[in-house]
Image: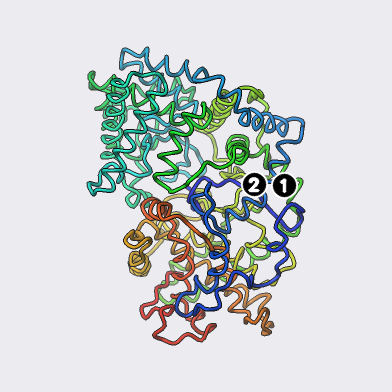
Amino acid sequence: MRRVIFALTCVAVPLAAAMVGAQSRTTAEIKGVEIDALDRKADPCVDFYQFACGGWVAKHPVPADRRSYGRFTEVQDRNFTILRRILETPGEGDRGKASDYYAACMDEAKIEAGGLAPVAPDLATIEELVNPDDFPVLIAHLHAIGVPALFRFGAQADVLGDATQEIAAVDQDGLSLPDREYYLKTDDRSVELRTKFAATVEKVFALAGATPEQAASDARAVLSIENALAAASLDRVQRRDPKNRLHTMPLNELQRTTPNFSWRKYATAAEAPRFQVLNVAVPDYLKAVDRLIGTQAATADIKAYLRWHVLHRTADMLPKAFADADFDFFSRTLAGQREQEPRWRRCVTETDQRLGEALGKAFVEEAFGPQAKADTLKMVQDIKAAMQQDIDAAPWMSGETKKAAMAKLNKVVDRIGYPETWRDYSSVRVTRDDAVGNRQRALAFERARTLAKIGQPVDRGEWSMTPPTVNAYYSPDRNNINFPAGILQPPFYRAGRDPAMNYGGAGAVIGHELTHGFDDQGRKYDGDGNLRDWWTAADGKAYEERATCVADQYSGYTVEGDARVNGRLTLGENTADNGGLRLALMAYLAGPGAKVKDKVDGFTPEQRVFLGWAQIWCESARPEAERLKAATNPHASNKYRVNGPASNMPEFARAFSCKPAAPMVRSNACRVW
């Protein structure tokens, strides 16, 4: 499990901009508040997001090829040109392999001419299945090539026993729609979306050669199978409690509860190391899968389901008709995106996802300097010191719990920029004329690497994000905070910029990730990554009361009129936003801002910290994308990531001289950290 600052879509992108020529000089050279981003007509005490971002939003409508456009995508775009240049320049070793991977992805003529040939063997293997006893071998093959059919299988830290060791793990997976609720809700919009989904499946089957009757029948079968899987799945809020996802059991016990599926046959076909114990995240889900497999009449339906997932997961690397059909529903209908992104941008993203550290190493060598790393480490130290003070001063915590919290905080490991040891892709075969084959071989490499961890010590040096990624994360089972090089650039950080803006941007991101170690999920792990209750009963109750205040606050927010933010789903991120901003302000005032009183750009130091935070969240988004985010994303809408924390802070009200009754001053202010 990873806790991240931002994860609306799989955004994997570039990095530090101050040293790179191919970037927007306007953003990169600004040393203080981005004045042009402000809306001076707005009152910061009424709507701080509008005041800080209204000008930026007005100047940045959502492009036709985007679901949304914000500061994260601005950084992405500014740096994609760097990644593209790296990939279009001949190189040696893994860098050259990344270039070949990109070239194959870009060869649309070759992809068009190849038709369904790249996946024909997989489709034939599915079609030839007669005996349900052979399902384990088939599923293992599909998992190896990146098709998440029925469930997912891998390795994870044994947090119930010894978090320094990896064990086997199996979890729910295999749905096409964004969330189980899309299958279960009965309102008109949900029914309409399921109808359009079935029509998309039918269209793709027809493109693959099925008769109209067979395509329609197979589409109904896919929807039926996925409805059954959705009904057995845990919902997103339930999954937020680690105890709901942790059920360590002997392999023999799992086999007894799912007699129709041979787990040993599956593990052998997957070439997993021998194991006797594994974590079964959702036992009832696997029982539902077993019931499906055990019904002879369902075999044909499951085969249709598997064929669909092969085509769906490969659509972007198949001829245009398949890619367009998949895009039309999953991007246009669900998220409002009007047009496909340019092919080169999709292929940069694809290469980063599959050979990320090969591309990332080249990127770091070209674009990431030592100043950003040194400055970030200094901010981390300052913010850790602020959290020590925050814990020590908490009136609601006992000395016993404070001592345990300090022990965990002192064990948090900081990682900045990139891994110490780069991944070796030499065993991955990549050619310039086989886009689907390249992807399948890269995915098989990653799967084999993951399964090889079973029974081995946890690699604490491994990163789960690539260096160019504009993101950050906290890992509870490793108790580390991770800041890829990609996020350490404007508007988050810039060398030589006003420290108040750097602390409000990158500093609050650091505080956000650090707070994740003590959010409603992270607080249940100790400093070694084990799931262990180190709270006294009274302190645990006091924590939950404070967390409930935050959950209730955000549940009162809506987007697009009637789409309500789920305060429980977003609780961890909202807690981290509130704590991160407060820690950043504390660290700034105790450090570089201790003797600074002068205004810059007309704003006091405290005001600039708040603006530094707000201006990283400026975003324009389509209504469909906002609805999708509210339904599925653990992060609140960007507007509330700004207004929510600020409205809870007396420091904000003082900084902007807000009256007690102002909308940005909550009478029932919430505070966990």
The disc at residue 26 is: none
* Amino acid type of the residue that numbered disc 1 sits on in the rendered structure: Val
| Image-quadrant location for residue 344 | top right
* Residue 479 image point, x, y percent: 53, 53
Residues at discs 1 and 2 in contact (Cβ within 8 Å): yes
Label 2 secondary element: loop
Q: Identify residue for label 1.
A: 364
Question: Compared with residue 128, is residue 563 higher up or lower down, i.e. above or below?
Answer: below
Q: Toward the viewer: 482 or 663?
A: 663
Above-or-below relation of 356 to 271 = below
- Say which label, 1 or 2, has the lower sequence index: 1
Is 330 located above or below residue 129 in the figure?
Answer: below
**Kind of element beneath mark 1:** helix
Residue at position x 45%, y 59% in the image:
573
Q: Position of residue 110 (x, y in %)?
A: 60, 22
Which of the pair 67/363 is nearer the observer? 67
Of 16 and 223, nearer the camera is 223
Is the image coloured rainbow, by chain, by secondary structure, or in one colour? Answer: rainbow
Query: Disc 1 to disc 2, how far (Cα)?
Result: 7 Å
